[in-house]
Amino acid sequence: MPVLFIGHGSPMNGIEPNVFSRSWSQQAAELPVPTAVLVISAHWYTRGTHITTMDMPPTIHDFGGFPQALFDVRYPAPGNPQLATETRALITKTEVGMDHDWGLDHGAWTVVRHLYPDANIPVLQLSIDYTKPAVWHYELAAEIAALRRKGVLVLGSGNMVHNLRMLSWEMINGGGYDWAVEINETFKRLISDGDHNALINYKQLGEAAKLAIPTPEHYLPLIYTLGLKTAEEPVSFFNDQAVGGSLTMTSVRIGAEKDRH
């Protein structure tokens, strides 16, 4: 099963039929139908590693200041407790907590509802341990690679460049600061070259990287997806746009599209 990193951007992308959400739908059309989706979202940032384990994960509206229509959305995809148990068993780096309280945050449902609008594919979330460095997350991702062979779509949801403090409302419909465009191009080049070590050690990429990643939670989902990549797999980019000056929607697919023949 291919792997996706999605730049999810504003929660409004969850209900707006825009260039980004239409691209997410297109990705689903080009992928094999998964047995389940495992999301690593920037918005489940925890001490320790946890996985959702309920039969019906609730839709979490973890934001404020948006129209009521966004809060009214429910994405009633089932969970998969058995898959949660199997995933936990694959991970040896840490003890994984079996979580019955979280659900699907907006880093998950705003994207997945465009991929699978019928809500008929089980969806789970794996949390990001904020006490661990990037290399630790990269190594943990490699431990769950067997899920790909079971047809599970592993989806990292964040943004490569994400600095809300520098957001420009004048550029909200498109455009990035010079530093944001520069570091986004650097990230893409390193991904294409397979230089995961440089991406793991992103703090050494200069001032632009520090501006792009003031805190790591939106960047680490990318590290998870890179940790799942095999040596010869192709990489492609989509939604490669900057918005608001200091945020990029650039997304990555690891692995080829389904065979159409």
Image (tube, helix red, strand yellow):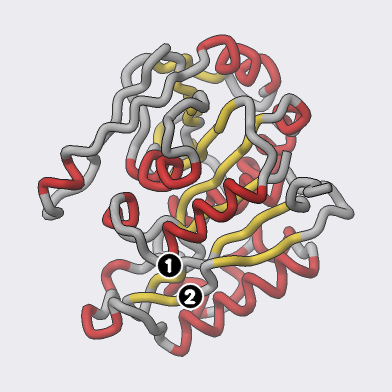
Instruction: Give residue 95's position: percent from left, percent from top.
Output: 57, 18
Q: Residue at label 1?
A: 19
Give whichever of 155, 14 is nearer the camera. Answer: 14
Question: Mark 2 near mark 1, Cβ–Cβ under 8 Å?
Answer: yes
SS of the residue under disc 1:
helix
Placement of 49 over or under 61, stated as above or below: above
Q: Amino acid at mark 1?
A: Val
Q: Amino acid at mark 2?
A: Gln
Instruction: Give residue 222's position: percent from left, percent from top.
Output: 58, 53
Q: In which quadrant will I find the N terminus?
A: top right
Q: Which mark is residue 241?
A: 2
Lateral position of residue 140 relative to residue 258, left or right: left
The residue located at (61%, 42%) in the rendering is 137
Q: Which mark is residue 235?
A: none
The residue located at (30%, 67%) in the rendering is 164
Give whichever of 261, 70 is nearer the camera. Answer: 261
Placement of 5 over or under 125, stated as above or below: below
